[in-house]
Image: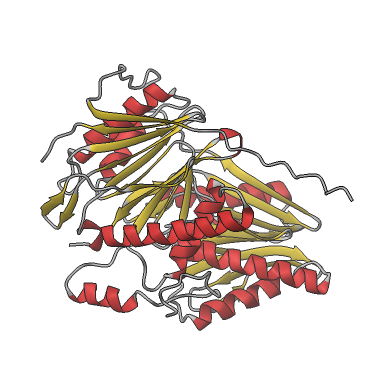
Amino acid sequence: MSIFEYNGSAVVAMVGKNCFAIASDRRLGVQLQTIATDFQRVFKIHDKLYIGLSGLATDAQTLYQRLVFRHKLYQLREERDMKPQTFASLVSALLYEKRFGPYFCQPVIAGLGEDNEPFICTMDCIGAKELAKDFVVSGTASESLYGACESMYKPNMEPEELFETISQALLSSVDRDCLSGWGGYVLLVTPTEVQERVLKGRMD
Amino acid sequence: MAGAMDLPAKGGFSFDLCRRNAMLAEKGLKMPGFRKTGTTIVGLVFQDGVVLGADTRATEGPIVADKNCEKIHYMAPNIYCCGAGTAADTEAVTDMVSSQLQLHRYATGRESRVVTALTLLKSHLFSYQGHVSAALVLGGVDVTGPHLHTVYPHGSTDTLPFATMGSGSLAAMSVFESKYKEGLTREEGIQLVSDAICAGIFNDLGSGSNVDVCVITKGKTEYLRNHQLPNPRTYASSKGYSFTKGQTEVLSTKITQLKPKVEIAEGDAMEE
């Protein structure tokens, strides 16, 4: 079994019109046994920047703590929040530093940058950035997520439609993956508000 | 204890997690695959300078991770480098050498030379004995003329009039070997590079999507991103999926208004 399949995960982020959505599943497992159905994979860095971490859960939590530490230091020194592009470079550098003994995590970064322009990107576990203009996926359900997002995504969706699309893509993909699922968590960010929703999904 | 504080590192690699990862591997957990760039990358020297070309597919095993990635990396205003192999390694090594070249330009006050970039790359890759898996095609024009080099992951280099690297290199090299001649014009050079990359895109499974071209001449560099798009997406229906509002079942909702950040204006200097 691969190290990424130890806990199971699914994370996806999509870009809409002046908004973005980031979603994850809620299962935490130890190989084939489920041990939690409310596990948090999407973390807040600041009001308009979120990071979803798929892969080994312990590395996801450690990496999140390191990133929050670095961001707080940045806020103290610069007296402002980090831009999403800068944060993506920080994550990439942190992961590449461990090139020969990596963290087993694949981050998905989503944020609103200058002029509330949405920004999403993903990386492999050693920090190879992939900037996308439409959607990014990661986790054990990533192959299904690629297929679902490729067909369901449309450019310039309004927040309501974006929410429906990302939820349907997530739920249909995790239904085809044994290791992820057990509900969904969707976070949608517009320039004025943040909407967090917990989805009802198949609990198997 | 040094390990407890995550101070910004002094640079270079950190091997903290190696022992833990080796223990996990012993327990039977397989190490993950890294994103590779599959790739067809080429370069050739024409009468006024150098033309570099690359495809735009990034793969993770058999899956296409990125349909339009950038494989032609900036090194200096007059030097560009195409990268094949592990994506993180090519990006990191080209960024690092690009920064070193910039510092060198500040120190010397001169335009960077291609051989400088070549030496920096080969010494870094050799010192890691091939574990930094980056195969590069480096090209540029400096005061001594146009140069084209290939760099292998173990640190060996070749200097050539035309070169190909990556999984699609055989397909591209067949095009170069039949059609390359010295003294090509700019248009002929771009056409030949595009033909070679297309050969890689259509015949090699690790390469695909679009053709990126970069033309470097004395005093001028043109980066033609997506110069050709031979694989447009034609199967998507124009209507797309549309979901009605409320179709997804939601258990709970929480909406937080974002407060605009308060700007603190600089106070006036105190009056005497």
Residue A203 quadrant? top left
What residue is rendered at 56% in x and 47% in y? A83
Does residue B191 sit above or below B219 in this rendering? above
Taking the spot 42% from the left edge, 25% from the top edge, the residue there is A159
Could you tell me how many numbered marks the image carries? Answer: 0
Q: Quadrant of residue A126?
A: bottom left
Depth check: give the residue in front, B85 or B231: B85
Q: Is residue B72 visible?
A: no
Q: Is residue A60 above or below residue A19?
A: below
Q: Position of residue B5 (x, y in %)?
A: 45, 72
Residue at image coords 58%, 56%: A76
Q: Which colouring convention does the figure follow? A: secondary structure
Name the quarter where the C terminus of chain A is drawn: top left
Please give the name of the residue rendered at 48% of the width and 66% of the height, measured from the top-left corner: B89
Q: Is residue A104 visible?
A: yes
Return the x and y of residue B77 as percentages of the image width and height: 73, 58
Residue farthest toward the front in the current orientation of the protein? B272
Quarter of the picture holding the N terminus of chain A: bottom left
Position of residue B129 measured from the top left corner of the image (x, y, whole percent): 46, 82
Q: Viewed as shown, does residue A147 lie left or right of A160? A: left
Q: Is residue B1 left or right of residue B242?
A: right
Q: Nearer the viewer, residue A4 or B144?
A: A4
Looking at the image, which residue sits at the far right? B272
